Amino acid sequence: MMNDVFNPPWGLRNGLVMTLYTAFKMSQVWERYTPEPEPESFPQIFLGGDGVPIFGEVSCPENAKGTIIGTYGITGDLQNQWFLKILRRKAIAQNYAVILFDWRAHGKTAELSATLTSDGLYEGDDFIRIAAKAKALGCPPPFWFTGYSLGGQLTLWAVKASEAIAQQPDLGLTEADIGGGAAICPSLDSLRSLTYLGGDRFGRYLDQAITRELKKLGWQLYQYHPQDIDPAAIDRVHSIWTFDQEMVIERLGFESVEAYYKASSPLYQLPSLTKPTFILYAVDDPMFDPTIVPDLQVACAPNPAIDLVLTAHGGHVGYISSKACQQQYDDRDPWWAWNRVLDWFNQQGA
C-alpha cells in the first residue's frame, strides 16, 4: 500500500538529498538525537551455515520479552554502523534482548573466516543458527530478524529460511520461536537496480562510493587470509557488479553475475513467505530501480503475512522525520523507521 503518513523536514523531501544528509550529517550527530543510553553487551562467536564463524554482540536484559537479531548493509562493521546502534539502544529500552552481528566477510567475522558474501543464499541460515545459539544462551523467543539495505535483503532470506526449521530438529528451535522479520529499504532485485545505477549520473556516484568501500573490504580479507584471496582480483574491481564478478560468483558456483543476482534477489520469494514480515520501502530511494515499486506491490498484495509500508519519501535508509511527524506518532526522536519497526514487533508480539 502507499502510505503518505511519513513526513520529513521540508528540505529532505528529495530522496537523494535525504540519503546524503543521513549518511554525512546525521551519522556524525546521531547520539544527540538518541536519548536512550548505550547498553552493555558481550562478544559472542556463533556458528552459521556450514560452520562459518560469525561474530556478534549480545545484550540480554533480565525478563526480556523477545530477541531482535540484526545486521547492516553492503559495507561497514559493528563498530561504525551507527544506525544499527540506534536500534540496539531503542530495543533494549523497550525490554528486548538484542544480537547484532558482522555478516559474512565483514568486520570481525572477516577476521574469523575467508568465506565471501552470498547476498542471502547462506546468510538466511546464519540468522537461524544465531537464533538457536541465542536461545541456548538464555535469550528468549520470539526471535525477530531485521536489517536495512542489503541487510534487509538478508533479513527476507532469513524469514524464508525459518520455514525449514522443522527439518532441522538439531537446532533446538521450534517454528513458534521465530516471530518474523522487518526490512528497511531492502535490496529486492540486484540485477535491475545495479543496471539502473550504471545508467544514472547520480547512481554512478553512489555505485563508486560503495565500490571504494568494497575494495577496502577486499584488502582487509586479503590481509587476514592472503592464501584465500587473490589480490589481482581486488585490483580488477571497479564497480559493485565487478566485485561480485571477481570475488564472489565463482566460489558460489555461478557462471555469471546475472545468474547470481537472479538467484539471490528476494523479490520473487515474497509471495510465498509465511512468517509475519514488515517491509518499509521509499518510492524515492535513489539506490533502486523505480520500476521495482509496482512489482513489489503486486508481490505483496496477495500475501497476508506481509505488511508493506510504501512511502513517497524517505530516501535510502534515511527516514528522518519532521517535528510535526514526531508529534503525530508520539516519537521522542527523528528515527521514524526504527520506531515503526519496533511498533510492529510490539504489535506482533502482543
Image (cartoon, rainbow, N blue to C red):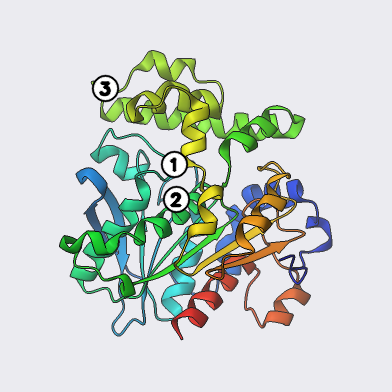
> Disc number at residue 119?
1
| Amino acid on which the number 1 mark rests in the picture | Asp
Q: Residue furthest top?
A: 232
Q: Dot 2: what SS?
A: helix
Does the CB distance between marks 1 and 2 fall below 8 Å? yes
Of the numbered discs 1 and 2, the one sitting upstream in the chain is: 1
> Disc number at residue 226?
3
State the image coordinates of residue 40 (x, y, percent, origin top left).
33, 69
* Label 1 to label 2: alpha-carbon separation: 6 Å
* Label 2 to label 3: alpha-carbon separation: 27 Å
| Amino acid on which the number 3 mark rests in the picture | Pro
Q: Dot 2 corresponds to which residue?
A: 154
State the residue in front, 78 or 168. Answer: 168
Q: Dot 3: what SS?
A: loop
Of the numbered discs 2 and 3, the one sitting upstream in the chain is: 2
The label nearer to you, 3 versus 1, is 1
